């Protein structure tokens, strides 16, 4: 039977897409790592030729997706708790390990001098944080407010993003007067000149221990292992430091 040219080319496209998908490493990463991960992946692909697809979201939601069978190869969480949860349930092929320590900042595009004290002012009506139930940076922000003794006074001002990414959108758009986000966000090339921010003292919240695990359901285990190894290389760790993370080896 003769194959028509159009059918032949369609087959080539379908096969090509299937092959591309099979060879692409899918990395699920917490939203705070969005900018740093893009740069790490670019470096990794340049050195190995392995293409990567990045999926971002809150650590809690990504954990739920993995538990439900999402086809990810490797998971980088904003804390160590969620990777440990997946490990205990048998979803990982490696033990959770800390790859970086995150920093929390208070950021505003509307106020020149962000501070915890101005959160009490009547002029501040909306304070953005990531959902503390699913996002470790949101959980850290709530702890900061409680330790400062102002949580009860300002809790009605809080607006919750599903992840750090949505929280950033609230702050950038002016939908929130001020908000808590990851230090890596305000140091990113796209955002570093937007507004003003202050670092939050690490003593005011639990350490943000960011963990990574390889996933058992992965069909690209060798590629995942190569990325996992690269994450702890000097080159990747330097990128993490550039975005304000403390690295595990320090």
Image (cartoon, rainbow, N blue to C red):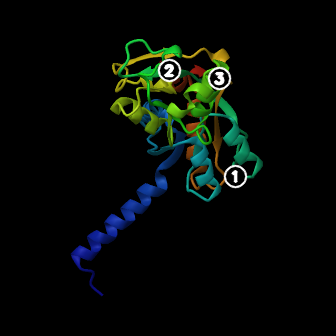
Which one is nearer the viewer's eye here, 155 or 222? 155
Residue highlighted by disc 2: 119
User: Based on the displayed image, in which of its 4 quarters is residue 99 positioned?
Assistant: top right
Q: Secondary structure at mark 3?
A: loop
Q: Residue at x 37, y 20 (%)?
A: 192
Task: Report the quarter where the C terminus lies.
Answer: top right
Q: Residue at x 60, y 21 (%)?
A: 150
Where residue 161 appears, as percent x and y from the top left, is 49, 39
**Distance of label 1 from label 3 (alpha carbons):** 24 Å
Q: Are the residues tagged 1 and 3 within 8 Å (C-beta)?
A: no
Chain-order first, disc 1 or disc 3: 1
Tell me if mark 2 has few (under 14), some (14-19) or many (20+) residues whose alpha carbon lies within 10 angstroms of its own.
Answer: many
Tell me if I can see residue 201 in this picture.
Answer: yes
- The total of numbered circles placed on residues is 3
Where residue 144 appears, as percent x and y from the top left, is 62, 22
**Distance of label 2 from label 1 (alpha carbons):** 41 Å
Which one is nearer the viewer's eye here, 189 or 49? 189
Task: Report the quarter where the N terminus lies.
Answer: bottom left
Q: Is 19 left or right of 229, judged from the image as shown? A: left
Residue highlighted by disc 1: 91
Q: Is 181 left or right of 140, judged from the image as shown? A: left
Q: Residue at x 64, y 44 (%)?
A: 214
Which one is nearer the viewer's eye here, 180 or 111? 111
Chain-order first, disc 2 or disc 1: 1
Chain-order first, disc 3 or disc 2: 2
Tell me if mark 3 has few (under 14), some (14-19) or many (20+) residues whose alpha carbon lies within 10 angstroms of its own.
Answer: some
Where residue 11 appears, as percent x and y from the top left, is 33, 71
Q: Residue furthest right?
A: 88
Q: Nearer the viewer, mark 2 or mark 1?
A: 2
Q: Secondary structure at mark 1?
A: loop
Label at residue 133? none
């Amino acid at each position: 039977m003769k194959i028509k040219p159009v059918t032949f080319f369609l087959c080539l496209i379908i096969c090509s897409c299937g092959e591309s998908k099979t060879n692409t490493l899918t990395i699920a990463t917490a939203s705070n790592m969005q900018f740093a991960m893009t740069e790490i992946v670019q470096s990794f692909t340049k050195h190995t030729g392995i293409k990567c697809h990045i999926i971002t979201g809150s650590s809690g939601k990504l954990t739920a997706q993995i538990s439900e069978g999402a086809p990810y190869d490797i998971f980088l969480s904003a804390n160590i708790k969620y990777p440990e949860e997946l490990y205990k349930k048998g979803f990982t092929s490696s033990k959770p390990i800390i790859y970086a320590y995150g920093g929390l900042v208070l950021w505003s595009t509307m106020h020149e001098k962000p501070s915890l004290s101005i959160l009490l002012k009547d002029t501040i009506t909306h304070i953005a944080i990531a959902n503390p139930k699913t996002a470790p940076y949101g959980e850290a922000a709530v702890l900061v407010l409680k330790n400062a003794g102002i949580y009860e006074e300002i809790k009605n001002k809080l607006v919750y993003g599903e992840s750090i990414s949505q929280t950033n959108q609230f702050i950038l758009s002016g939908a929130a007067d001020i908000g808590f986000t990851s230090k890596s966000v305000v140091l990113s090339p796209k955002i570093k000149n937007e507004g003003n921010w202050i670092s939050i003292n690490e003593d005011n919240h639990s350490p943000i221990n960011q963990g990574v695990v390889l996933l058992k359901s992965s069909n690209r285990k060798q590629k995942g292992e190569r990325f996992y190894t690269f994450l702890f290389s000097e080159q990747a760790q330097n990128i993490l430091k550039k975005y304000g993370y403390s690295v595990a080896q320090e």
